[in-house]
Amino acid sequence: MNEVTLHRRQAMLDYDTAMRTQFGVICGVDEAGRGPLAGDVYAAAVILREDHGIIGLDDSKKLSEKRREALFPEIQEKAEAWCIATASVAEIEALNILEAAMLAMRRAVAGLQQKPGYVLVDGNRWPEPGFPGETVVKGDATSASIAAASVLAKVARDHYMIEQAALYPQYGFAQHKGYGTAAHTAALREFGPCPIHRLSFLKKIL
């Protein structure tokens, strides 16, 4: 691991320490799966102890799949509290993807075993979680708590899409996790959509 990465990860821990000093119990929140053509959208909320001891927390997009998979159970074991929640394909279609992602975030915060004093949400849209807090642009690279939430949401959604691949093998969900790759688009044109496709996302394809 290079010095720049080590410095940034320490800065993420220091950010959380400063927020705890100001607000008490903090919670990081992030979502996964806004962009794909298929599947539920996932969100996670995580409360980390000051001395959580989890090494290598980072924006899930910057981590290898192997590293994310290793962190997934470690975060669940060592976090003070955590919750993973979803909004369904039907809810995505009824509400739109942004509002469905906000719904999943609210569900994740509501499902925590411990209530936070302050909520840190990745991005620039506030999901109205019922607690005070703020949005943090590029929060998954700023706060260790948000980074932990990003890992839980991403890995949980990947696992879900692998399960869906067994049900609908013709689409290759295990490989692309529902994103609009060339192989996925070709399968859609050959087989048409399946029950977990977001039909509102397919208008330019079909």
Image (cartoon, rainbow, N blue to C red):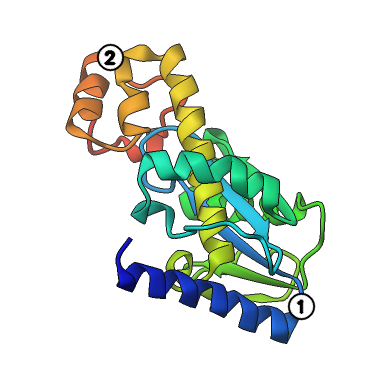
* Badge 2 density bin: few <14, some 14–19, many ≥20, Cα 10 Å: few
| Image height of 106 relative to 35, above or below | below
Residue 61 appears at what percent x and percent y? 37, 53
Q: Label 1 near label 2: C-beta < 8 Å?
A: no
The amino acid sitting under disc 2 is Phe
Quadrant including the N terminus: bottom left
| Image height of 29 relative to 14, above or below | above
Work out which residue is located at the far bottom of the displayed protein and give it: 22
Quadrant including the C terminus: top left
Asked if one can make out residue 195 in the rendered structure from this viewpoint, the answer is no
Front: mark 2 or 1: 1
Q: Secondary structure at mark 2?
A: helix
Identify the residue at image location x=46%, y=13%.
167
Identify the residue at image location x=55%, y=72%.
13
Residue 123 appears at what percent x and percent y? 47, 67
Whether residue 163 sits left or right of residue 76 in the image: it is: left
Residue 109 appears at what percent x and percent y? 71, 56
Q: Which mark is residue 113?
A: none
* Badge 1 density bin: few <14, some 14–19, many ≥20, Cα 10 Å: few
Residue closer to the observer: 190 or 14: 14
Disc 2/disc 1 C-alpha distance (Å): 52 Å
The amino acid sitting under disc 1 is Gly
Whether residue 158 sits left or right of residue 133 in the image: it is: left
Residue 79 quadrant: bottom right
Residue for badge 2? 191
Asked if one can make out residue 155 in the rendered structure from this viewpoint, the answer is yes
Residue 170 quadrant: top left
Q: Which mark is residue 24?
A: 1
Residue closer to the observer: 92 or 52: 52
Q: Secondary structure at mark 1?
A: loop
